[in-house]
Amino acid sequence: MASAPPIEEETTSNPLDNIIGSLKAGDDSAVVAQLEQLHISDVAASLESLPPDLRQQLWEILPQEIEGETLTHLSEEVRARIIGDMENAELVAATQTMEVEDLADVIDELPEDVSEAILDSLNNERRQRLENTLSFADGTAGRLMSTDVISVRTNVSLAVVLRYLRYLKPLPLHTDALMVTDENGIYLGKLAISTVVSEHPETMVGDVMQTDIDQVQANASDHDVATLFERRDLISVAVLDEANHLLGRITIDNVVDIIMAEADKALLASGGLKEDEDLFSPVFSSAKRRAVWLGINLLTVFLAAWVIGRFEEVLDKIVALAVLMPVAASMGGIAGSQSLTLTIRGLAMGQVTSANLRWLGNKELAVGLLNGLVWALVVALVTYAWFQNTGIALVIAAALMLNLIVATFSGVLIPVVLTRMNIDPALSGAVVLTTVTDVVGFLCFLGLATLFLL
């Protein structure tokens, strides 16, 4: 009996590994073939995942027709580095394929002479749309919106609307609804595409449009826009000026970018890094940025060390205290970070206000007290079993309970105070909290030991 042929294991290769291998081998045609299989966003991700020399090599191979769109998907730092190495004429050519909204994000980063050359190269319609977009502050709905929006009037039938849509094809991406305006451009409501195709063709727009629908003002923050989309499960929303004129629309793909950017910012800020930190940036610039927060942390450590130094006498006489010191500080740090994280999240989502802040503070105090009682008892029993000393066990229990109470309350207070001082709590809250819990933990533990054990 003939034996069955051996089954070959399927191997999956990482596209980035293939690109790096082809770049190192100098096989430009293989690189281009691999790029053609990738979405533009994946091309940008590949660029961001390369060391500077390979990144420049890949950019030089990149087909010119996708340079503009690729730039819009890059983080600010990586984009700035690539733009800095591009010739002015190449930059102007790359921007011709960009959407107006993307061009508005990029043009502020360009040298003035390049920006002027780009403006001069635009036709009147694109230039007007760009200037309108740039008139809104960065981080607002007006800057985020697209002016590529379809509007209809109330006094036309759905049959007319359908003929109009066929004439306009293809429709703008993510067109789930048409905007309804009057003859002066005043926003009246939305007409869902599902309604257009399912209702009787002779039905008038005014009879089936939605009037109780969400909308945003052009000066609303992009964070507020993202929160609205998340809470209402929106696909698109109309953007209006103060007189309720329709200016454009924001779609879910824009909002996903905001949510991802905010998540990246919060994650990196917890480590003292910028949200657009380039993983492969030069050593000196990376070290310089990180050195700031290392220096700040060193100051807080010296403060905690100074507190310990005030109790040198009691540490010399009772060695067990040195062994137990980290317990009170560490437990307080964990408890405080839990409150800090929840409060920062609540502030970001608009759940924490001056009206409910007192209740939240009281609740966290109660949580700290309850956890303090439970874990103070546990630590006291372990300490007594370890050192056979009732006094030390009671001192560590009292210090732990006090620090847990202070830590949980500080976890609420610190981000609120920092926010009111216009300081990002995600960036500096953890450093401040660690200082508080360390100082209070050491002060309570060693202070109580000095009072009752010497």
Image (cartoon, grey):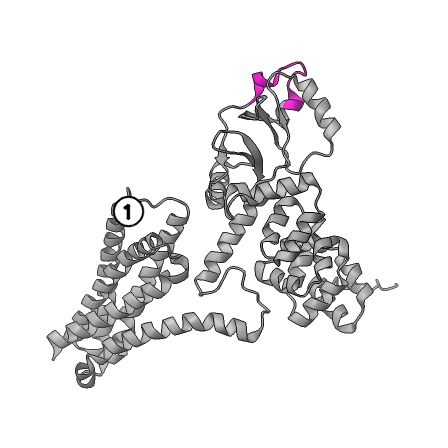
The residue indicated by pointer 1 is: 357
Quadrant occupied by the N terminus = bottom right
Indicate left or right for 454 with 118 as reference: left
**SS for callout 1:** helix
In this rendering, the answer to whether 372 lies above or below 27 is above
Q: Toward the viewer: 139 or 70?
A: 139
Q: Give me the residue at 60% from left, 43% from top.
A: 131
* Residue 197 visible within the image: yes
In this rendering, the answer to whether 286 lies above or below 223 is below
Query: Which of the 4 quarters of the picture holds residue 409?
Result: bottom left
Magenta region: which residues? 196-209
The spot of residue 178 in percent (x, y) is 61, 28
Q: Residues within 10 Å of mark 1 (few under 14, many from 20)?
A: some
The spot of residue 44 in percent (x, y) is 66, 58
Q: Toward the viewer: 97 or 129?
A: 129
Q: Give me the residue at 57% from left, 65% from top.
A: 278
Question: Any magenta on residue 92?
Answer: no
